[in-house]
């Protein structure tokens, strides 16, 4: 199985990680259909 | 996006190591309302306060994805007054992604950042000259044209 993107799915957690890791956030809105 | 761009090794490495990637459904509330979502895929670059700096709508190829995100990061750094970091980010686009859709805008913003950082107008003129030579048809070349008079 290939490697995959380690997506967050919780907005607040993503912002908290961004602050702690001094990174920007990339938010992808997607439609599975 | 999942089967093409998000399966590309370079994109995976970039997303996992250089940013915090978050993926949500198009009807996620309150996020869809907060960010005025109208179409998918929509990809937004934001800071740790949720402030949006750049968005792209529609499919992006693996070759265009990283420079598009770097452009958003560079613009975020620029708008935060972090000019040296912004210049380094735009330089990365210009150096590593020489002919991508994001490249002319990166050249333009690099010149603006250099000017804001040093107050030397020559950087604006240099940006125009580079755009004129490498991207003569770009809208960013037209935007920079007045700098040729400096």
Image: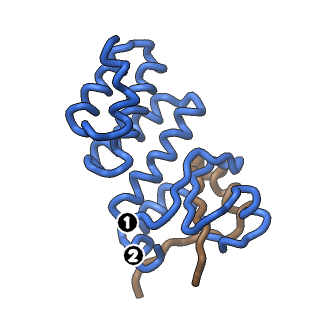
Categorize mark 2 by other alpha carbons within 10 Å: few (<14), some (14-19), many (20+): few
Chain represented in blue: B
Categorize mark 1 by other alpha carbons within 10 Å: few (<14), some (14-19), many (20+): some
Answer with left or right where residue B108 lies relative to residue B97. Answer: right
Residue of label 2: B4
- Looking at the rendered image, the quarter that the C terminus of chain A falls into is bottom right
- Position of residue B109 measured from the top left corner of the image (x, y, whole percent): 43, 33
- Position of residue B118 measured from the top left corner of the image (x, y, whole percent): 43, 15
Answer with left or right where residue B47 lies relative to residue B74. Answer: right
Chain of the residue on which disc 2 is drawn: B
Residue visible at 57% across and 52% down in the picture:
B45
- Looking at the rendered image, the quarter that the N terminus of chain A falls into is bottom left
Quadrant of the rendered structure where residue A16 is?
bottom right
Mark 2 vs 1: CB contact within 8 A: yes
Q: Is residue B123 at all visible to an observer of this figure? A: no
Chain represented in brown: A
Task: Please tell me which residue lies in front, B64 or B139.
Answer: B139
Residue visible at 40% across and 83% down in the picture:
A2
Residue of label 1: B61
Residue reaching furthest to the bottom = A1
């Amino acid at each position: 199985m290939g490697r995959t993107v380690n997506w967050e799915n919780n907005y607040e957690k993503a912002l908290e990680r961004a602050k702690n890791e001094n990174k920007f956030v990339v938010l992808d809105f997607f439609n599975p259909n | 996006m999942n089967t093409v761009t998000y399966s590309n090794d370079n994109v995976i490495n970039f997303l996992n190591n250089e940013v915090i990637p978050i993926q949500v459904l198009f009807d996620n509330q309150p996020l869809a309302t907060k960010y005025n979502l109208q179409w998918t895929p929509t990809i937004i670059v934001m800071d740790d306060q949720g402030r949006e700096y750049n968005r792209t709508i529609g499919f992006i190829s693996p070759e265009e994805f990283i420079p598009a995100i770097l452009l958003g990061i560079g613009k975020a750094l620029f708008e935060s007054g972090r000019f040296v970091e912004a210049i380094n980010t735009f330089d990365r686009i210009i150096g590593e992604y020489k002919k991508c859709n994001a490249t002319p805008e990166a050249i333009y913003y690099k010149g603006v950042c250099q000017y804001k950082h040093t107050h030397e107008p020559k950087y604006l003129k240099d940006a125009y000259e580079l755009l004129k030579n490498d991207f003569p048809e770009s809208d960013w070349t037209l935007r920079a044209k007045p700098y040729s008079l400096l």
